[in-house]
Image (tube, rainbow, N blue to C red):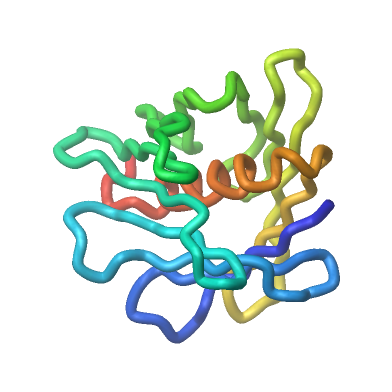
Amino acid sequence: MRLIIKQRIFSWTDSYDIYDENMNTKYTAKADFFALGHRIRIFDLYDREVGYINEKLLRLFAEFDVYIGGRRCGSIKKKFSLFTPKYDIDYNGWSVDGDFFGWNYQVRQPNGLVAATVSKELLHLSDTYVIDIFNEADEIDVLMLVVAIDAANCSNNNS
């Protein structure tokens, strides 16, 4: 299955529309306007919150907790790196490898199998990412991880 994330061009906060492979809107993502730290909420078609990511404050490097259905599911921490972004990921036992800076990476399960691939499409007016998810049951988990990595990449704590 495939999800396409498109960042909204004209928005006061980070906002994304998330589509299925047929370009039907499936989710929306909106950053809270008045929040301490960065908080992005994911909503389904019926405007019900599916999950959110929340930045931990007072950290040397960006760190985000991931919540699905109100339950903390893991965290993403940006690590010190000179040239390319690197992360500690404590989320479903998954690991992530590839080129974060160029937005081409793979999400791997603990057994080494690929759970999802993420790539950035070029030649669009706004940032557009394609997520190929290999098990439909992982859809929300993968989506939340990708949004958290994007938030960490764009965080003011760039290092």
Q: Quadrant of the C terminus?
A: top left
The answer to whether 115 is drawn above or below residue 129 in the figure is above
Residue at image x 50%, y 64%? 48
- Left/right placement of residue 3 relative to residue 154 reads right
Residue at image x 58%, y 75%? 126
Image quadrant in which you'd find residue 133: top right
The answer to whether 148 is drawn above or below residue 5 in the figure is above
Decide which of 61, 48 is in the foreground and name it. Answer: 48
- Left/right placement of residue 54 relative to residue 44 reads left
Residue furthest to the bottom:
10
Decide which of 135, 132 is in the foreground and name it. Answer: 135
Q: Where residue 57 sits in the image (x, y, percent)?
A: 18, 41
Q: Where residue 134 sits in the image (x, y, percent)?
A: 83, 39
Q: Where residue 14 sits in the image (x, y, percent)?
A: 41, 68
The answer to whether 142 is drawn above or below residue 19 in the figure is above
- Left/right placement of residue 54 relative to residue 148 reads left
Residue at image x 40%, y 54%? 154
- Left/right placement of residue 84 relative to residue 131 reads left
Residue at image x 67%, y 60%? 129
Q: How many marks?
A: 0
Q: Where residue 89 sits in the image (x, y, percent)?
A: 49, 26
